[in-house]
Image (cartoon, helix red, strand yellow):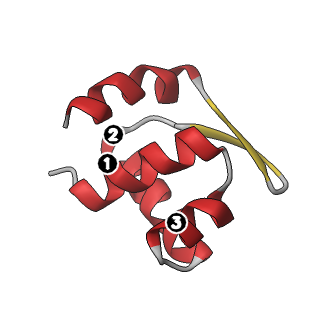
């Protein structure tokens, strides 16, 4: 079952393309945000973000998930 907090975390990360900013907005730690995203990726069986150092960008799977996540 997909956790709604993980979906909310994903949406903020997808909008900001920054896990630290997402953590600040959601009043979470950055490692917690990373853990939520990794757990969601594991549950869905896809990689949602390409990580390059501190930079992130959505994968094709991540872009497909955004409209669904907004409806949830």
Distance from the alpha carbon under mark 1 to that under mark 3: 24 Å
- Name which residue lies at 38% across and 28% down: 65
Distance from the alpha carbon under mark 1 to that under mark 2: 4 Å
- Name which residue lies at 55% across and 19% down: 60
As drawn, the residue found furthest toward the right would be 53
Which residue is nearer to you in this view: 24 or 9? 24
Q: Which percent across, then down, holds residue 5?
A: 29, 61
Q: Is residue 39 left or right of residue 2?
A: right
Q: Pointers 1 and 3 in contact (CB under 8 A)?
A: no
Residue 54 sits in quarter:
bottom right
Front of the two marks 3 and 2: 3
How many neighbours does mark 1 have within 10 angstroms: few (below 14), some (14-19), or many (20 or more)? few
**Residue linked to disc 1:** 43
Which residue is nearer to you in this view: 39 or 56? 56
The secondary element bearing badge 1 is classed as: helix
- Quadrant housing the C terminus: top left
Reply above or below: 6 against 72.
Answer: below
Reply above or below: 27 against 57.
Answer: below
Q: Earlier in the sequence, mark 3 or mark 2?
A: 3
**Residue linked to disc 3:** 25
Q: Which percent across, then down, holds residue 48?
A: 52, 37
Q: Is residue 39 left or right of residue 4?
A: right
- Name which residue lies at 55% across and 49% down: 13
Front of the two marks 1 and 3: 3
Q: Pointers 1 and 2 in contact (CB under 8 A)?
A: yes
- Name which residue lies at 14% across and 51% down: 1
Residue 53 sits in quarter:
bottom right
How many neighbours does mark 2 have within 10 angstroms: few (below 14), some (14-19), or many (20 or more)? few
Residue 59 sits in quarter:
top right
**Residue linked to disc 2:** 44
């Amino acid at each position: 079952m997909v956790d709604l907090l993980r979906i909310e975390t994903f949406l903020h990360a997808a909008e900001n393309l920054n896990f630290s900013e997402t953590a600040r907005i959601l009043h979470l730690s950055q490692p917690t945000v990373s853990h939520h995203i990794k757990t969601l990726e594991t549950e869905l069986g896809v990689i949602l973000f390409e990580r390059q150092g501190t930079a992130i960008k959505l994968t094709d799977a991540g872009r497909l998930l955004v409209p669904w996540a907004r409806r949830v």
